[in-house]
Image: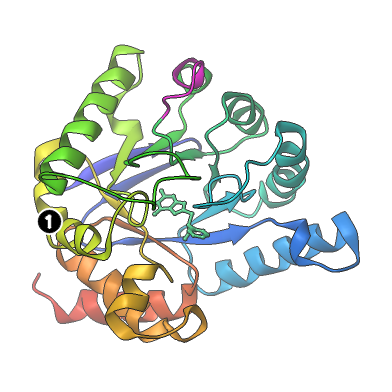
Amino acid sequence: MRHYLQCGRFGFSLGRKALVMGILNVTPDSFSDGGKFQSLEFAVSRAEEMIAEGVDMIDIGGESTRPGAPSVPLAQELERIMPVLYALREMGKPLSVDTYKPEVMREAILAGADMINDVNAFRAPGALAAVAESDCGLCVMHMQGQPHDMQRDPHYVDVVNEVIGFLKERVEAMVGAGIERERICVDPGFGFGKTVEHNFALLRNIGTIQRELGLPVLAGLSRKSMIGAATGKPVERRLAGNLAGALAAVAHGARIVRVHDVVETVDALNVWHLATEN
Ligand code: 7PM
């Protein structure tokens, strides 16, 4: 099955060849000195590197959505994201912005973002209205709880069906707000209010999620604790585990994989593509 995904200036026919979404973290805090300009320079050079490595889309994140992380104030999130969006706008690749704040969504779309990636599934008041009148792609992710408490004691009776039910409800709310289905992709939200067992149950059932929703699935497993649990490796030694996770997601039907390790994932997917039927 092929899905068309409208992503702002871009349109993708998503077939068996999965797309690679490269993660671009914009976090001034990671620089002990140098401040704002240095962090912008770093983000732009990493984006250029990812493009040379074969990335298909770039997901710009101001670190507002990290599990357990304190929330970033609106002004600071805008200050981090907007200069990067302007700097990358003419680089020829779709730009996604990872945010749950409607004000950031509006500003990002005005600045030319091609996709909004919301770990909160556009549930914030005003989020649906912020994105409805545009043609940007939308990633709708499942999360149980809120980032500050979601890993405390995740609980499901049937994780796969509960995630599917949630995503169906959110997609219907989006369509009800006038959003075209061909702008939407869905994401089970690995690590967002899930145990390792929940995460692997979802990974094994990406095909079911895709069929039940009738929309392309985006999978983000890169460096997450499920890879750590399966390998016993710390985050900086998870490359092989990350690649196996990305390939498994694609084997189960994911159409977009969200990763840190772009060149390795592109290579792995190129081999995978030629090695699997048709
Ligand atoms: C610490 C823990 C830092 C987790 C960062 C993270 C997803 C996402 C994130 C995902 C979509 C990360 C995560 N994860 N957006 N944003 N899907 N659509 O690994 O799985 O970057 S934050």
Where residue 199 sits: x, y (%)? 24, 60
The answer to whether 232 appears left or right of 277 in the picture is right
Residue corresponding to mark 1: 205
Nearer to me, 212 or 238: 238
Q: State the image quarter where residue 232 is shown.
A: bottom left
Q: Relative to 130, is 159 on the left or the right?
A: left
Q: Percent position (x, y) of residue 1? A: 11, 49
Residue 155 x/y as whole percent: 23, 47
Magenta stretch, main secondary structure, is loop
Magenta-span inclusion, residue 222: no
Above-or-below relation of 200 to 188: below
Q: Amino acid at mark 1?
A: Asn
For residue 194, above or below residue 120: below
Q: Quadrant of residue 200?
A: bottom left
Q: Secondary structure at mark 1?
A: loop
Residue 162 appears anywhere in the view = yes
Residue lying at 52% horizontally and 82% vertically, measured from the top left: 236
User: Picture quarter containing residue 230?
Assistant: bottom left
Does any atom of ligand 1 lie closer than 8 Å to the CB of label 1?
A: no
Q: The C terminus is located in which quarter?
A: bottom left
* Count of number-bearing discs: 1
Residue depicted at x 13% and y 76%: 276
Taking depth in this image into account, of 210 and 142 the one nearest to the observer is 142
Queried whether the magenta region covers residue 128, the answer comes back as: yes
Say which residue appears at 16% left-offset and 81% top-offset.
Answer: 275
Residue range in magenta is 122-129
Query: Measured from the top left, where is residue 136 in percent x and y?
Result: 47, 32
